[in-house]
Amino acid sequence: MSADATIYYVVGFSITIIGMLAGSMYWLGRRFTTIENEINELRREINDVREDLHRAIDAIKASIVSVNSMMMEFLGVKGALTRDEIDFLTREIQRMVSLVRANPISREELDFIKSVFSKNLDDITIEELERVAEVAKRWWWEDGSEIAYKIFLYSWTIRAYKIHENLKKQRERGGGGGGTT
């Protein structure tokens, strides 16, 4: 075999190898693109499932709040809550709030809750209890804290008791009964 033939052979063989490598690289590139597209589609589907799951969890939380709020309001309207029970709940909120730090609720919100429950029960307004309940509900919604939910539920129960007591006082005075203040 001559030198020219060897060169032609090596060049031809090299071009064949380069062509095969180029074809393989092209095929791999297309395959990787397909895999990347499939991964991106999976990511989109996972994000959709994640969003659906968040919506479902929010719906469950909303249902829990609604059912428990309605039950506490019903017990309050029926007059099923005693002053001793409400005093117990007030002390429980004081105890729980004393353990809480300002995160995830603000220092102002924490101080507000502490100030409300440092008062005599007769001096706490329904509006203050509603604000405490809203802060605690948001806190529970964002953080999932058991303490937050208890504070929400207890303050809503105390609110129901106070509404019942106000209605009872109005009836005793002969005022009928409609207001909640």
Image (spheres, grey):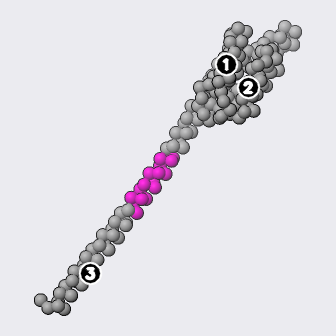
Query: Is residue 119 rendered to the left or right of residue 27?
Result: right
Residue at position x 33%, y 70% from top?
25
Q: Which residue is mark 2?
A: 113
Q: Local crowd at mark 3 within 10 Å, few (<14), some, or many (≥20)?
A: few
The CA span between labels 1 and 3 is 83 Å
Q: Magenta stretch: residue 122 in it? A: no
Q: Tell me the magenta residue range.
A: 33-48
Where does residue 147 sit, x and y in percent of width and height?
A: 62, 25
User: Height in image: 37 above or below 69?
Assistant: below
Where does residue 10 sit, x and y in percent of width and height?
A: 21, 83
- Label of residue 15 in the image: 3
- Please identify, in this view, whether the residue under mark 1 or under mark 2 is nearer the observer: 1
Q: Which residue is mark 1?
A: 95
Q: Residue furthest left?
A: 1
Where does residue 107 sit, x and y in percent of width and height?
A: 72, 33
The CA span between labels 2 and 3 is 81 Å
- Type of the residue with mark 2: Ile
- Label of residue 73 in the image: none
Residue at position x 12%, y 89% from top?
1
Name the one closer to the observer, 70 or 136. Answer: 136
Residue 180 makes an appearance in the image: no
Residue at position x 47%, y 49% from top?
45
